[in-house]
Amino acid sequence: MEIRFLGVRGSCPVSGARFKKYGGNTTSILINSSNTSLVIDAGTGITKLAERENFRENVVFLFTHYHLDHILGLPFAFLLYSEGYRRKMYGPDFGNFSVREALDVLSNPRLLPFKVSEKMLETHLFPVSEKFEVENFRVLSLYSRNHPLDGIMLYRIEAEGKSVGIATDYEVGEDLPQVVEFFSGVDLLIHDAQYTEEEYRERKGYGHSTEIMAAEMAVKTGAKRLVLFHFDPFHTDSEVDLQQLRAARLFPATAAAREGMSIKL
């Protein structure tokens, strides 16, 4: 199993010399098995044409939620309009707001001059369940209320004897015991680290964690490796460097996600 980071920012994309190391695109993660590409969220990172060679014939989209930074790249994703791929989409149903409704919102004619669902090639849409298998991936989901309005889906992805935990847009809170159990023993934990500890004091309840929370989660779950993820769009490379250093004091096997970074398990 190979994990590749296509976009690592939250909120909005950014560009410039101060964001060159980690990249400025919003959230998207590619997990490849032998015959399938699992795409977690479709922020602007998914639009990079240079990534075409990294996708398998079977493509499965899996959404954590439908905030704009996680779906902004979807209308412009080559995967939807290119021959040669077999496509499926899975996403949570937040009180009758599902993948289909998210596509319709993106296709509002005031915002976009074409309807995504009408232009994209054959793509099968499915709701997320607690446990399901797609191709050779086993997907486990855990719902958390700890993100504004609809909440967030946490995922544990298993394939080829390895496991990856996805906790983007998650704020550590009262459901910590359940989350720790859910991610117990993962080979790799990818965890939200949008805020520093100082920033968090003013932004508690915004639905995001700090690098220290992420490191503490890695310790509690017994994860083998930790990748900090979903950085504040205005945190410069040097600021993310400091976040990584602070987290590594608590959990040495810590890295900060960078666009194009690839991890093989």
Image (cartoon, rainbow, N blue to C red):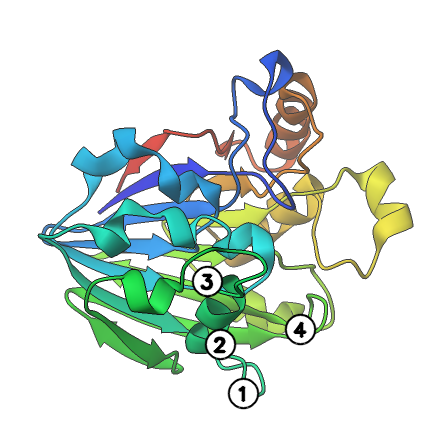
Q: CA distance from mark 3 to mark 2?
A: 33 Å
Which of discs 4 and 1 lies nearer the camera? The answer is 1
Residue that badge 1 annotates:
96
Q: CA distance from mark 4 to mark 3?
A: 14 Å
Q: Give the amino acid type for the residue marked by disc 2 in the picture.
A: Glu
Question: Neighbour class for label 1 at 10 Å: few (<14), some, many (≥20)?
Answer: few
- What residue is drawn where x is 40% and y is 53%? 75
At horizontal 55% and vertical 41% (from top left) the residue drawn is: 229
Amino acid beneath label 4: Asp
The CA distance from mark 4 to mark 1 is 24 Å
98 on left or right of 14: left
Nearer-N-terminus badge (2/1): 1
Quadrant (top left, top right, bottom left, bottom right) of the C terminus: top left
Residue 182 in sight in this render = no
Amino acid, disc 3 = Ser
| Disc 4 residue crowd, few under 14, some 14–19, many 20+, Cα 10 Å | few
Q: Secondary structure at mark 2?
A: helix
Q: Please say whether residue 35 is visible from this viewpoint.
A: yes
Q: Earlier in the sequence, mark 4 or mark 3?
A: 4
Upstream in sequence: badge 3 or badge 1? 1
Q: In the rendered view, would you say 241 is above or below 10?
A: above
Mark positioned earlier in the residue sequence (4 or 1): 1
Q: Amino acid at mark 1?
A: Asn
Say few, some or many: other residues with alpha carbon within 10 Å of mark 2 (under 14 / 14 to 19 / 20 or more): few
* Residue occupying image coordinates x 57% and y 37%: 251
Numbered disc in front, either 3 or 2: 2
Which of discs 3 and 1 lies nearer the camera? The answer is: 1
- Image position, residue 113 (x, y; %): 46, 55
* Picture coordinates of residue 144, whole percent (x, y): 61, 73
